[in-house]
Image: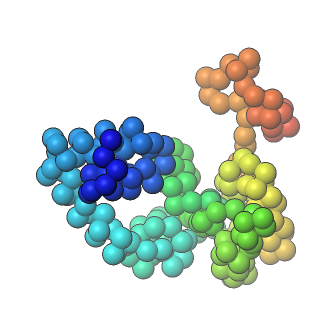
């Protein structure tokens, strides 16, 4: 196996993508270089353009090439409801999968003291300034269902209480189409605790 040269470097760099191991990276590299050079060139050009032009929205902190993202400038969005998420990818996921019509605030992570990630690193000072203005009436805490995500949601819930803003946590539990025998104990426990009345 070749351990030097540009081909090896391309394969190595493709491995930085989530879920892409050496074999997948190798297939991608050969596909782009052997059969799809036009698309490879277009991909390289758009990545360079994106790196140069995409930054963070000054209001919600998601990725955008503008000062404010499309959601923040959309006058039809509900400015009184704010959904708190951990990453820009979560904004896309929630916006495409739900009927949520409010706005977002992106943390870019979760509280993790062992990794040196505290409230300042998550922009919670910015969030608190936003809450202090009084326009936001409800926070939807859509952090991940992990210990760190739960701790982050709890911390932000305390900020919401301080500013008299209603806070709610996303429900978690049995997925649509899920069968109980295949659900892990933690998920099932959350589902029981978060059960709601049938109307």
Q: Which residue is drawn at 81% across and 29% down?
A: 185
Q: Position of residue 184 (x, y in %)?
A: 75, 28
Quarter of the image for the N terminus: give it. Answer: top left
- Is 15 positioned to the left or the right of 103 in the image? left
Identify whether 66 is placed above or below 196.
below
Front residue of 32/179: it is: 32
Quarter of the image for the C terminus: give it. Answer: top right
Q: Is residue 40 visible?
A: yes
Q: Number of marks in the image?
A: 0
Front residue of 129/100: it is: 129
- Is 27 positioned to the left or the right of 165 in the image? left
Q: Which residue is drawn at 45% across and 54% down?
A: 16
Quarter of image, res 129 = bottom right
Q: Is residue 75 visible?
A: no
Q: Position of residue 109 (x, y in %)?
A: 64, 63
Q: Where is residue 70 in the image (x, y as percent from the top left)?
A: 41, 67
- Is 189 positioned to the left or the right of 173 in the image? right
Q: Which residue is drawn at 65% across and 23% down?
A: 178
Identify whether 179 is placed above or below 63.
above
Q: Residue at x 33, y 68 (%)?
A: 50
């Amino acid at each position: 196996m070749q351990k030097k040269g540009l081909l090896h470097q391309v394969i190595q760099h493709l491995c930085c993508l989530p879920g892409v191991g050496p074999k997948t990276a190798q297939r991608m590299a050969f596909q782009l270089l052997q059969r799809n050079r036009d698309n490879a060139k277009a991909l390289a050009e758009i990545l360079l353009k994106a790196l140069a032009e995409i930054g963070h929205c000054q209001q919600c902190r998601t990725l955008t090439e503008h000062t404010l993202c499309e959601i923040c400038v959309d006058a039809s969005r509900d400015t009184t409801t704010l959904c708190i998420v951990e990453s820009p990818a979560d904004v896309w996921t929630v916006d495409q999968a739900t009927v949520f019509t409010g706005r977002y605030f992106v943390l870019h992570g979760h509280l993790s003291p062992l990794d040196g990630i505290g409230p300042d690193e998550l922009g919670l000072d910015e969030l608190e300034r936003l809450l202090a203005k009084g326009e936001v009436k409800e926070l939807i805490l859509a952090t991940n269902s992990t210990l760190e995500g739960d701790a982050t949601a709890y911390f932000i819930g305390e900020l919401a209480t301080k500013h008299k803003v209603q806070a709610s946590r996303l429900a978690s539990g049995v997925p649509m189409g899920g069968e109980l025998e295949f659900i892990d104990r933690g998920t099932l426990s959350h589902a029981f605790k978060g059960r709601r009345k049938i109307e």
